Image: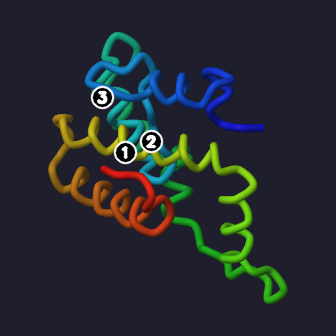
Amino acid sequence: LYQFEALDNDLDTAINYIKGDTPEVLVLTSDCASTSIRLLAEKMPQFFSVEKTETFLNSSASNANRREDRVVSKPKAYFNKTLMKEKHKKWFSEDWDFYGAALIQFRKELISSTLPLSEVEGCVLKLDQIIETEISHLVI
């Protein structure tokens, strides 16, 4: 049910796996899909070719391209997305804490990467907006 349980049943232990200067688990986020994939290729060149990663990301087969190009549909009038998100934050507060820690760690990894500055800046701006509006109780 909870995201963090993929790493450990204890929230604090799971967060410790993803935090720090040399985390045991590299955190990626769908909030910046293409950037996450590029960061993965940069951090783990033994598994991923930067050249093949770029070829994939620039192809029509890339889910990241489809995600960024999709038309965002409006929720149905009877569905209150804001209210549901607030309820979700209460019901799954540990998940939101893990998500917040993951975004903050991803932001740190991104800033220390060698990815193009324009891409890093765009993603950091997006992450900062999410952190400010969705998980402001956590400190960067």
Disc 2 or disc 3, which is closer to the eye?
2
Report how far apart the C-alphas of labels 1 and 2 lie in the structure.
Answer: 5 Å
The answer to which of 50 and 118 lies nearer the viewer is: 118
Question: Comparing marks 1 and 3, which lies closer to the viewer?
Answer: 1
Answer few, some or many: residues within 10 Å of disc 3's Cα (few below 14, many 20 plus, some between 14 and 19): few
Mark 2 Cα shell of 10 Å, populated few (<14), some (14-19), many (≥20): many
Q: Where residue 80 sits in the image (x, y, percent)?
A: 75, 81
Q: Helix, strand or loop at disc 1? A: helix
Measure the alpha-carbon separation of dots 2 and 3.
Answer: 30 Å
Question: Between marks 1 and 3, how big is the CA–CA gap?
Answer: 28 Å
Secondary structure type for disc 3:
helix
Residue of label 1: 104
Q: Residue at x 66, y 76 (%)?
A: 82
Identify the residue at horizontal 33%, vertical 61% (top origin): 128
Give the vertical position of 93 relative to 76 (above or below): above
Measuring from the top left, give residue 59's x and y in whole percent.
46, 45
Q: Are marks 1 and 2 in contact (CB under 8 Å)?
A: yes
Q: Nearer the viewer, residue 56 or 74?
A: 74
Colouring of the image: rainbow
Q: Quadrant of residue 67?
A: bottom right
Mark 1 or mark 3, which has the lower sequence index? 3
Q: Is residue 128 left or right of residue 91?
A: left
Q: Amino acid at mark 2?
A: Ala
The residue wearing badge 2 is 101
